[in-house]
Image (cartoon, rainbow, N blue to C red):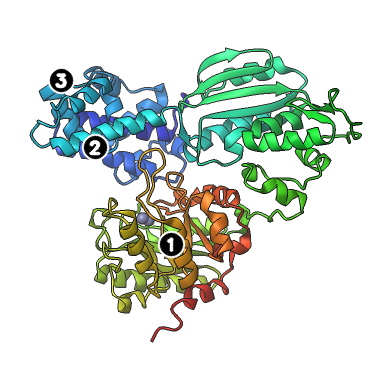
């Protein structure tokens, strides 16, 4: 049997839907593929088993014909229908689908009228005015397409951490299990939990480099081999990212791991500390510096990074902090914070259900949260102005509150759903629902979802006005950025942090790996001002509750401890936090 994953099947189904739309096929057929892709995406059962037992049609949204196609993909690793369909189109056209704001309808018009089927032709058409002249396009559309092309060029070769993590971790796990491997880790910006990464660096300690290198370059996640050397190999993974393997001895391992973890600026500062002790430090060893004018200090034995930091007069510095942003001074003075860990989280507040644009029900989301070991889950579906996300009108919101209160009875206090909302911040900074309505909820997340292009001063005022409302507990995804695809809107972040401190508003760390917003660089300032953090996955499915993992990585990078993050508080204490801001309201 082939190794095709559920995710790969979802991609193919989506691709088929796009191609059918390009062909102008009937809408029901197109929708069938789109629906099947979405149904499969949110399916949480055992995919391989479901296919093997011919149970696919039991999944709502998957009909008999598509079930047969999925079965064919799993059995043979490909789909004849897909291959035939794909051959009808110029290959460049699929790249165009990746551009923000360019859907199949526009792509079809561009192809039919101007014969545009490549990115290069598209760019030319934007510049020479031919696209702007098309009916239904105009100058603004042409400019937007051009901007999307430029953004894409800028981001080529950069990947969101969350997207490459599954492959990266799988490969790590399998390397770890090799009998010849004594130690292994991913180094680089991935280990430092940067929001985007360019490559993945594996450091392996082994006595027998050859079989380990062979295993690496032949792994199923590998698409092509770039280089295979005695101590360093490079490959391109199927996700498109480059992965490098460095093979070292056990003695070299802590030095290689520290060196390749970086950052560059952090390494320079560390190396200077070694020099000051009369030592030289590189990726393989710490040794007496022959060029040193003074007598080198004796070098203690070093088996781990911890030993290395200690030899340099430092407490151990967690990889996330190694950005030369004060961590070395703090480590010297024993003032590094005890960083938050995933298992410190007790609940989360910004999550969607089928009531708005989520894919799972209240009960399913609650069950998934309990499975993750959480004590509580906050439901914050969209409010009415987010009509494209099926935002809740008042009657549906009241119905959901009642449903939540009802569901809560069954858990006898051992688990709790909180009734909240992700309330749109309107253009003038007022909220999508009046305070009488907000008062019926346990909490409110306020977010900006439209009019992104207002000037910075106006946007800042809009947000500050919103968080001054006593019912707003959390400021959602503060800048609205989508990593590698959309810049955040213009907003004065320090001014919002000050206002959050004044009003007792908690700022969200949106843990969706496309967002990771507010950015880790701002959290030390927020902490200094006394502003608390809430880590929210903004989950639209049961599976994406696990985005919390990426949120914790970012929080650690922002120097946060469990005391800084309110959803580390257990049931019984968190209620006080939710109620505190609205307490004085009459
Ligand atoms: Zn939102
Ligand atoms: Zn949301």
State which tag comes first along the sequence, 3 or 2.
3
> Whole-percent x and y of residue 174?
63, 30
Residue at 23% x, 39% y is 32
**Secondary structure at numbered mark 1:** helix
- Is residue 366 visible from the viewing direction of this image? no
Choose between 6 and 330: the one closer to the eye: 330
Circles 3 and 2: CB atoms closer than 8 Å: no
Q: Quadrant of residue 459?
A: bottom left
Q: Is mark 3 within 8 Å of ligand 1?
A: no
Mark 2 surroundings: few (<14), some (14-19) or many (≥20) residues within 10 A: some
Disc on res. 496: 1
Above or below for 566 versus 123:
below
**Secondary structure at numbered mark 2:** helix
Disc on res. 470: none
Please tell me in which quarter of the rendered image ligand 2 is found.
Answer: bottom left
Residue at mark 3 to residue at mark 2: CA–CA distance: 20 Å
Q: Is mark 2 within 8 Å of ligand 1?
A: no
**Secondary structure at numbered mark 3:** loop
Q: Is mark 1 within 8 Å of ligand 1?
A: no
Circles 1 and 2: CB atoms closer than 8 Å: no
> Whole-percent x and y of residue 317?
71, 45
Choose between 63 and 132: the one closer to the eye: 132
State which tag comes first along the sequence, 3 or 1.
3
Front tag of 1 and 2: 1
Total numbered labels? 3
Residue at 76% x, 38% y is 305
Residue at mark 3 to residue at mark 1: CA–CA distance: 48 Å
Residue at mark 1 to residue at mark 2: CA–CA distance: 29 Å
Which residue in the protein does label 3 denote?
115
Q: In this image, 1 relative to 434: left or right? A: right
Q: In this image, 342 relative to 22: left or right? A: right
Which residue in the protein does label 2 denote?
144
């Amino acid at each position: 049997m082939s190794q095709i994953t559920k995710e790969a099947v979802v991609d193919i189904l989506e691709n088929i839907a796009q191609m059918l739309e390009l062909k102008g096929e009937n809408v029901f057929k197109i929708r069938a593929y789109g629906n099947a892709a979405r149904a499969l995406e949110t399916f949480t059962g055992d995919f391989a088993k479901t296919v093997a037992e011919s149970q696919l049609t039991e999944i709502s949204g998957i009909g008999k014909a598509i079930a047969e196609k999925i079965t064919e993909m799993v059995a043979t690793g490909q789909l004849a229908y897909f291959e035939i369909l794909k051959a009808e189109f110029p290959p460049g056209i699929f790249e165009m689908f990746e551009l923000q704001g360019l859907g199949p309808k526009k792509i079809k018009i561009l192809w039919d009228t101007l014969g545009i089927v490549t990115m290069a032709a598209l760019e030319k058409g934007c510049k020479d005015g031919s696209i702007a002249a098309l009916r239904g396009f105009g100058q603004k559309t042409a400019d937007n397409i051009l901007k999307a092309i430029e953004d894409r060029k800028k981001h080529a070769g950069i990947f969101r951490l969350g997207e490459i993590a599954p492959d990266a971790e799988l490969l790590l796990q399998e390397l770890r299990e090799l009998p010849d491997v004594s130690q292994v880790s991913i180094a680089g910006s991935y280990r430092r939990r940067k929001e985007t990464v360019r490559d993945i660096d594996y450091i392996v300690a082994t006595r027998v480099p050859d079989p380990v290198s062979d295993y690496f370059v032949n792994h199923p996640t590998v698409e092509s081999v770039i280089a295979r050397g005695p101590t360093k190999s490079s490959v391109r993974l199927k996700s498109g990212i480059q992965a490098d393997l460095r093979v070292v001895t056990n003695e070299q391992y802590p030095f290689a791991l520290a060196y390749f973890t970086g950052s560059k600026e952090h390494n320079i500062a560390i190396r200077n500390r070694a020099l000051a002790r009369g030592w030289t430090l590189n990726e393989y060893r710490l040794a007496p510096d022959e060029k040193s004018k003074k007598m080198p200090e004796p070098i203690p034995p070093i088996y781990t990074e911890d030993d290395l930091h200690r030899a340099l007069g430092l407490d151990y510095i967690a990889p996330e902090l190694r950005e030369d942003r004060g961590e070395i001074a703090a480590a010297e003075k024993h003032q590094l914070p005890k960083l938050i860990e995933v298992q410190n989280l007790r609940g989360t507040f910004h999550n969607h259900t089928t009531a708005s644009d989520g894919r799972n029900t209240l009960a399913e989301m609650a069950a998934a949260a309990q499975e993750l070991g959480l004590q509580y889950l906050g439901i914050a579906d969209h409010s009415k102005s987010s009509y494209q996300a099926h935002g809740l009108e008042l009657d549906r919101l009241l119905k959901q509150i009642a449903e939540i209160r009802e569901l809560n009875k069954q858990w006898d206090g051992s688990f709790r759903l909180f009734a909240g909302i992700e309330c749109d911040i309107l253009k003038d900074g007022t909220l999508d629902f009046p305070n009488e309505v907000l008062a019926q909820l346990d909490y409110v997340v306020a977010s900006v979802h439209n009019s992104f292009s207002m000037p910075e001063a106006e946007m800042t005022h809009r947000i500050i006005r919103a968080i001054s409302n006593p019912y707003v507990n959390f400021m959602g995804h503060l800048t609205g950025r989508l990593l590698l695809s959309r810049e955040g809107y213009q907003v004065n972040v320090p001014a919002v942090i000050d206002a959050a401190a004044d009003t007792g508003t908690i700022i969200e760390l949106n843990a969706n790996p496309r967002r990771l917003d507010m950015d880790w660089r701002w959290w030390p300032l927020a902490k200094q001002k006394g502003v608390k953090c809430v880590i929210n996955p903004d989950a639209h499915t049961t599976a994406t509750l696990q985005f919390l993992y990426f949120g914790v990585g970012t929080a650690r990078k922002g120097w946060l401890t469990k005391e800084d993050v309110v959803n580390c508080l257990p049931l019984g204490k968190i209620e006080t936090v939710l109620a505190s801001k609205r307490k004085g309201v009459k």
